[in-house]
Amino acid sequence: MENENDKFEITRAVEDFLKSVFSLQQQQERVSTNDLAHVLGRTQPTVTDMAQRLMTAGLVDYQKYRGVRLTTAGEEIALKILRRHRLIELYLVREMGYALHEVHDEAERLEHAVSDRFIEALSARLDDPQLDPHGDTIPAADGTMAERELLPLSELPERTRATVSRLKATSNDMLQHILDRGFQLGAVVEVLLRDPFDGPITALVDEKQQTIGHGVASCIDVERV
C-alpha cells in the first residue's frame, strides 16, 4: 500500500516554508504563524493551511495557538536548502563578482533550480567552505553545522577586542550601511562607549572610530579575540 507521504510534492513553496521555520527556530522554540506570514509575505490563513499540510506529510509539528516546529524529516530538507543557498551566495561573491547586497535574491531563485550533484561540485570548487559571505555557517552535506560562540556587537563589553564574524542585516540598505562603516567580516572591533537606554555605540573598527545605532550593532555578530 502506498504511503501518503510518498505522494507529497516538495515544491519551492514547501522548501521556502521549511527553511523559514528553521531560521526562526534559532530564536524561539516554536514559530508562530504570524511570524512565518511576515517572513514569507503570505497571509496567515495561507501559512496555517501549509502548516497543516506539512504536518500531515510528517515535516512539521503544528499546534494551534502554539505554532510550528520542524520534525527531523523537515529539518533535513531545510538544511539541504540552506546549504544550497549559502554555497550559491559564496560562489556569486567569490567567483562571479557579485556585491554582498546582491547575492541573497539571486540565491533564492537558484537554490530551487540546481541539482544535488551541482551543489556538491560547487562545494568542491570552493574547497568545502564552512561560512557563507555573510558569515553564516554552511551546513555540511550530512546536515551537521559547526558550533560557534558569537555575540552581538551591542552586547560586547567595552574595551574588549573581537572580530566581526556574521552580518545579520534585515535589509540590503542596512547591510550597505554596515559595510560602509567598515564592519567587514574579519574586521577587528572594540567598543569604546555605549550610550544608555539602547543609545548609539562608538567603536573602533580596524583602528578607525565609528558610531552606529544600537539596532544596527545588534545585527553584527562578533567573536572575542
Image (tube, rainbow, N blue to C red):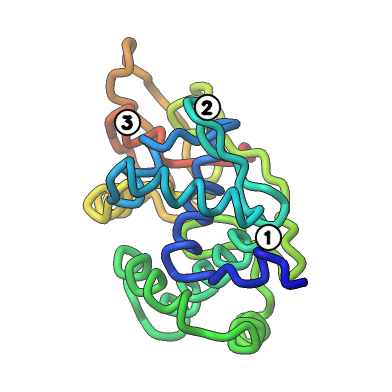
| Pointer 2 with pointer 1, Cβ within 8 A | no
User: Which comes before the other along the chain, label 2 or label 1?
Assistant: 2
Query: Farthest left residue?
Result: 173
Query: Three-letter amino acid code at disc 3?
Result: Gly
Is the Cβ of the residue at disc 1 closer than 8 Å to that at disc 3? Answer: no
Task: For the residues labelled 3 and 2, say whether their Cβ atoms are less than 8 Å apart.
Answer: no
The location of residue 2, given as percent across then percent down, is 73, 72
Q: Residue 76 carries which label?
A: 1
User: Which circle's residue, 1 or 3, is located before the other in the chain?
Assistant: 1
At numbered mark 2, what does the secondary structure look like: helix, strand or loop? loop
Label 1 element class: helix
> Residue 111 versus residue 136: which sits nearer the camera?
111
Which tag is nearer the camera, tag 3 or tag 2?
Answer: 2
How many circles with numbers are drawn on the protein? Answer: 3
* Residue 75 in which image quadrant: bottom right
Q: In which quarter of the image is the N terminus?
A: bottom right
Q: In the rendered structure, which amino acid carries the disc numbered 1?
A: Glu
- Of residues 131 and 140, the one drawn nearer to the viewer in this rendering: 140
Residue under the point 51% across and 84% down: 114
Is the residue 136 above or below the residue 61 in the image?
below
Q: Which amino acid does label 2 sit on?
A: Arg
Whichever of callouts 3 and 2 sits on the residue coming sooner in the sequence is 2
Q: Work out how far the residue at label 3 is from the one at label 2, CA to CA, in angstroms.
A: 28 Å
Residue underneath mark 2: 66
